[in-house]
Image (spheres, coloured by chain):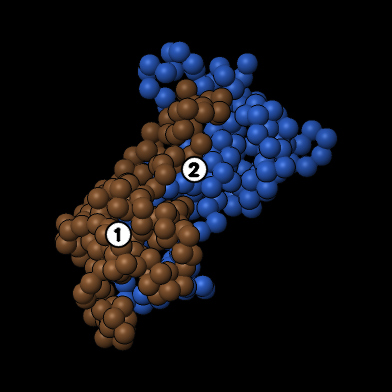
Chain colours: A blue, B brown
Amino acid sequence: MQLTLHTDFALRVLIFLSQKREGLATITEIADFYQISRNHLVKVVHHLAGSGFIKTTRGKHGGMELARVPELISIGDVVRHMEPNFDIVECFDTSNPSCVVSPACALKSVLYQAGNEFLGVLDRFTLADALEPSEATSQIFPLEQLLNR
Amino acid sequence: MQLTLHTDFALRVLIFLSQKREGLATITEIADFYQISRNHLVKVVHHLAGSGFIKTTRGKHGGMELARVPELISIGDVVRHMEPNFDIVECFDTSNPSCVVSPACALKSVLYQAGNEFLGVLDRFTLADALEPSEATSQIFPLEQLLNR
């Protein structure tokens, strides 16, 4: 059971932006920081901007920033926007119903309930919550320090 | 967010076996019924047998059957056994911690809670529940009739 790398990267971009002290961030800066594909990041940033989570500014000194404070960015909302679908198994894709028993099978409803519960948990947290590590880890490795070294 | 095709096929095999009226089922029979890859099904059946969900008998008249009644096969248990991992995002894989902020990031704990909730819902249902379609669908397309035509 996995989220896509696209969603994973989107969450990392938002975490980076929420800790950036001043100015706009660039794709190159974020790709270098996380050591991840710049090309993939271009698509992620485009999607995040289109979904209203970040604001981008063009030009020589352009870049991106969060569209609102981390306390107002729901993790559930980000995951819902970034995942291409929530087709937990093949029969969720109603445009391509290939399983012969799907019209009479109640498993889909069970998996649907489970998927809803998954998203329900994420809805209870915001980006600000993702930035609050336990006391133990924050003493060893403060996120803010890491992102602004 | 998806389960693997391996888990999807495993659930289909169990549904087929739970509706098989008499005798043992063969891989060819199940592959033909669902129109899915026989080779993939061989691996799925091997995994299901190794995990104690089905019993297999070798020989000319061999085949497979459920190891216990559908009421005693938990959907959560099947999904836990069949999924290769529950690494919702990359940093769940502790053998390969590639995200630079992971020691200070609380997102993993949020996603972990959501994944647990997903499996918790599945734990509340058995294979027998997956065989109980709504009144509406069962009237149109009874599963038992479909599987024994």
Q: Residues within 10 Å of mark 2 (few under 14, many from 20)?
A: many
Foreground residue, A58 or B111?
A: B111
Foreground residue, B66 or B64?
A: B64
Residue B118 pos. (x, y %): 33, 49
Q: Secondary structure at mark 2?
A: loop
Q: Residue B12 lies in what quarter of the image?
A: bottom left
Instruction: Identify the residue at image location x=59%, y=52%.
Output: A51
* In this picture, residue A66 sits left or right of residue B123: right
Label of residue B58 in the image: 1
Task: Single out the residue that lies furthest toward the right.
Answer: A60
Instruction: Identify the residue at image location x=59%, y=31%.
Output: A16
Task: Single out the residue that lies furthest toward the front.
Answer: B60
Check contact, mark 2 vs mark 1: CB within 8 A: no
| Residue occupied by mark 2 | A73
Q: CA distance from mark 2 to mark 1?
A: 57 Å
- Residue B11, compared with residue B106, is above or below; it is below
* In this picture, residue B92 sits left or right of residue A149: left
Q: Chain of mark 1?
A: B
- Residue B44, compared with residue A130, is above or below; it is below
Foreground residue, A2 or A129?
A: A2
Instruction: Identify the residue at image location x=67%, y=41%.
Output: A41
Q: Secondary structure at mark 1?
A: loop
Residue A18 pos. (x, y %): 56, 32
Which amino acid, by three-letter code, is at mark 1? Arg
Q: Quadrant of the C terminus of chain B?
A: bottom left
The answer to whether any part of residue A69 appears in the image is no
